[in-house]
Image (tube, rainbow, N blue to C red):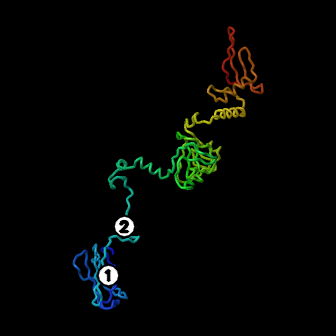
Amino acid sequence: MRKNVSGQAISANLLSKTDGSAVTTGTTTVYVTGDAGTQVSGGGTVTHKGNGEWSYAPTQAETNYTHIAFTFVNANAVGQTLNVYTVGQDFTGATLASTVTTNNDKTGYSLTAPYDAAKTAAQAGDEMALTESALLDVRNKFLIANDSLNAPAVTANSVELSSGYAADDSLVGCHLFHFTDVGVFIQARTITAWDNSTLVATVDRAWDVTPADTDRVLIFAGPLDSTKTGYALTSAYDPAKTAAQAGDAMTLANDAVSAAVLAADAIAEIKAAVEETLSSTSRAELAAVPSANASLSDKLTWIATVLRNKRVVTATEETLYADDGTTPIATSDVTAASGTLTRGEYTDVP
């Protein structure tokens, strides 16, 4: 029953004093006792509803107590006293929506003390008990394994871990991240099978680099699609990327790759690639003298032009011609004095 609200009702079933049958006639009076005070005759309305049920509609004032005792009395019936504890809130949805308010502009929150609306954001930050151990606890809810490999048995797509972690197949679908013993990331896979008796985890595809002794493996909860071959570190992930396209889009930090982590034949492969590029790349003949800070390719082309093409030298000038042998490209002054021949810098033909 709601406190201090009119229009409510309470019922009691009255039974005969003589045979226990339902009392349906006579005069029934209801007495009201509020908060253990003096019992008074009720001022509300009593109505027989049928089959011995007598309903009493109290006045609003009679509901304005925390505890109310309603006593039903009929000369032919055994008396009944009903105890009621009132509530102050209207629990209908519409009323709740109109009475519940929110305040979203508070800037001070303390996790270690009761809420203080006067707190500033900076003060709240000072009192916030967010510790390193709490952050590690969050991480560890997802980190299942942190394993240092010990001479593991390895196949093309499986690896033996050092410790057991869970029942068979319970690691299926989890992330497996493979690192060197000094923390350099190597590859990622999804676990497709786990045998806790042999400590062997099978992954979704063959290793790019075979896990080795002292390497480290981290296993996190949740699936990982490790079949994607296109990753652009400077833009949104595009699953349509091929491995070659991913290489074009990838931006590495300065000194991200050191000589120590290159494969043994990496230098030879780089040298071969440079030689292949130089041997297969053609360059058009220059039509003018390159500047002192011109590109390396222009300088190499100019050297080839000077060594290969026709040059005509007179007592005062040298002329360099194009491949056709008739079109002058550049000239330089020539002087001779006391047995010394001097040729000046090439300049463009006017």
Q: Reply above or below: 37 against 242.
A: below
Residue 259, percent from left and from top: 58, 33
Q: Quadrant of residue 344?
A: top right
Position of residue 14 relative to residue 153, above or below, is below
Per the rendering, the mark at residue 270 is: none
Residue sitting at x 72%, y 29%: 285
Q: Secondary structure at mark 2?
A: helix
Classed neighbour count for the residue bearing mark 2: other residues with Cα under 10 Å, few (<14), some (14–19), many (≥20) = few
Q: Residues within 10 Å of mark 1 (few under 14, many from 20)?
A: some
Q: Position of residue 225 (x, y in %)?
A: 59, 52
Q: In which quarter of the view is residue 68 placed?
A: bottom left
Q: Is residue 175 left or right of residue 139?
A: right
Q: Can see residue 162?
A: yes
**Helix, strand or loop at disc 1?**
strand
Tell me what residue is drawn at x 56 percent, y 55 percent: 168
Q: Which mark is residue 99?
A: 2
- What amino acid type is highlighted by mark number 2? Thr
Q: Residue at x 27, y 90 (%)?
A: 75
Name the foreground residue: 273 vs 292. 273
Q: Position of residue 140 (x, y in %)?
A: 47, 50
**Residue 350 visible in rendering:** no
Residue to which mark 1 is pinned? 57
Amino acid type at image mark 1: Ala
Q: Nearer the viewer, residue 330 or 305?
A: 305
- Quarter of the rendering occupied by the C terminus: top right
Q: Is residue 103 above or below residue 20?
A: above
Q: Position of residue 23 (x, y in %)?
A: 33, 90
- Name the quadrant of the N terminus: bottom left
